[in-house]
Image (cartoon, rainbow, N blue to C red):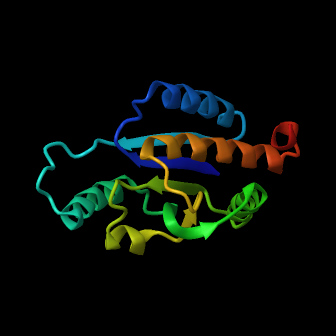
Amino acid sequence: MKIRFVQIGKTFQDFVVAGCQSYRKRLLNYLPYEEVVIPALKNAQGLSPEKFKAYEGEQILKKLDPRAYVVLLDEHGQAFNSEGFANFLQQQMNSGIKNLCFVIGGAYGFSPEVYNRAQAQISLSPMTFSHQLIRLIFLEQLYRAMTILRNEPYHNA
């Protein structure tokens, strides 16, 4: 199974960039992994949240493989502990899914069209995190899930 991680805007905070690079490198030992960065909308002052979501939604939909199983990282999604997230990934692998795509939306969330395209929604926490920080948290949890599935000591170390 290949994992694709679609996100709006570049990662620019140095500590987040360094952490993401570390987990990306580790993940490649377990499965193919790819990131797709959609440029953030420039000169967006005066745009309503709905227009903002519509524009970002169009950009997200262009980057999704039509055969991919799409999972939105969304505050209203299903919450898992780390073992539950590992089990979710294992279920996707067992079902024969070849392309699993996780998506982080912009500051206003997702357009209705993106919600309609997705097969699942996952919440990483009931707390709100910056879009920069959530990238690192997600990559760490994805790596942790891989180590759980392989019974490696990272999860309990």
Name the image quarter holding residue 18.
top right
Q: Could you say which is closer to the camera, residue 74 or residue 32?
A: 74
Q: Could you say which is closer to the camera, residue 22 or residue 76?
A: 76
Name the image quarter holding residue 19.
top right
Q: Residue at x 52, y 48 (%)?
A: 4
Q: Residue at x 36, y 64 (%)?
A: 110
Q: Is residue 152 above or below residue 54?
A: above
The mark tally for this picture is 0
User: In the picture provided, is 81 more to the left or to the right than 57?
Assistant: right
Q: Residue at x 75, y 59 (%)?
A: 90
Q: Is residue 97 above or below residue 25?
A: below
Picture coordinates of residue 30, whole percent (x, y)? 72, 39
Which residue is outermost to the front? Answer: 127
Picture coordinates of residue 38, whole percent (x, y)? 33, 44
User: In the picture provided, is 104 more to the left or to the right than 143?
Assistant: left
Q: Could you say which is closer to the camera, residue 61 or residue 95?
A: 61
User: In the picture provided, is 69 more to the left or to the right than 151?
Assistant: left
Picture coordinates of residue 31, whole percent (x, y)? 67, 42
- Quarter of the picture containing the C terminus is top right
Picture coordinates of residue 41, whole percent (x, y)? 22, 46
User: In the picture provided, is 129 more to the left or to the right than 55?
Assistant: right
Q: Residue at x 42, y 43 (%)?
A: 36
